[in-house]
Amino acid sequence: MNEKKGFSISGYGVFAILVATSIYIITQAAIGNIEIATVLTFILTIAAIPGFFLVQPNQAKVMTFFGTYVGTVKAGGLRWTIPLFIRKNISLRVRNFESSQMKVNDNHGNPIEIATVVVWSVDDTAEAVFEVDDYLSFVTIQSESALRNMAISYPYDQHESDNIALRSHPKEVSEALKGEIQQRLAKAGVKVHEARISHLAYAPEIANAMLQRQQASAIISARRLIVDGAVGMVEMALKQLSDKEIVELDEERKATMVSNLLVVLCSDKSTQPVVNTGSLY
């Protein structure tokens, strides 16, 4: 079922007509000229009054006639329609939904806690009212279901450079989450404007172990960078000593020098040098 425009006209013009007919009826009654036309005008005036309704900004009225959908009115202000139409108010304003913190397993089976914030609005009033029983409850349940399904599709941390992870790729994850939620809510006439993760953490039972793992990964990365830099510095030192002919070193002395430089450059504590006051050989 798709949304369509319902019949309504400006209520101000109808109100002016009813005022005029009311003055006519009162005048005729005052002079005692009560005819069939006067009675019919009075009946029609009374019957037309329930047809007035107000439409607030960013709201709509979904109208039905004896169980049949006849259209939606989105024009704001005082409106008038056929009095027999039953009108239901529905908001078109942008809303926020924040899910509760859920415990799920990521792509690697690690238990994590995750929550999301979804920004949404009603796009098709007919689908929102008639396709689902309660579109507010539908948004809540389907958003949490989509979040759970998205969380098990990605790992918490990035273990390879080409992998998308929940913690390291927030933009890509948000787009995937938005698409997942929109696909589920489209049948309810709901448009998702934004979806992003509001809470992400390891579950308490593995938080300490994962913290140690992150620290170990950081130490390994730092050590790898230090070793790469130290090797480059040693290579540069040997090359400059050879190019400038400051001293000639045999292979054994080069190996000793390389070992000493690597110890000095790669040590995580201050080294205590031993000064050789004798001959180099």
Image (cartoon, rainbow, N blue to C red):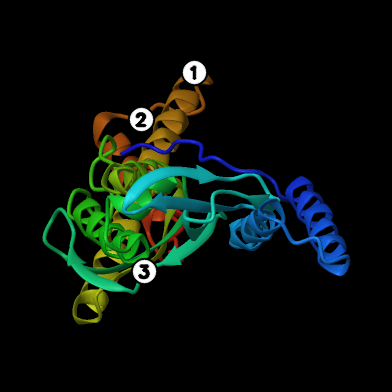
Q: Is residue 169 visible?
A: no
Q: Nearer the viewer, residue 275 or 146?
A: 146
Q: Position of residue 59 (x, y in %)?
A: 58, 54
Q: Secondary structure at mark 1?
A: helix
Q: Which residue is mark 3?
A: 99
Residue occupying the point 64% across, 63% down: 46
- Screen quadrant of the N terminus: top left
The amino acid sitting under disc 2 is: Leu
User: In the rendered image, which residue does mark 1 sit on?
Assistant: 243
Residue type indicated by callout 1: Asp
Q: CA distance from mark 1 to mark 2?
A: 12 Å
Return the residue at label 2: 249
Which of the two residues, 1 or 23, is positioned nearer the viewer here?
Answer: 23
Q: Position of residue 167 (x, y in %)?
A: 36, 55
Sequence-first disc among 2 and 3: 3
Q: Earlier in the sequence, mark 1 or mark 2?
A: 1
Asked whether, in this view, residue 9 is left or right of residue 69, the answer is right
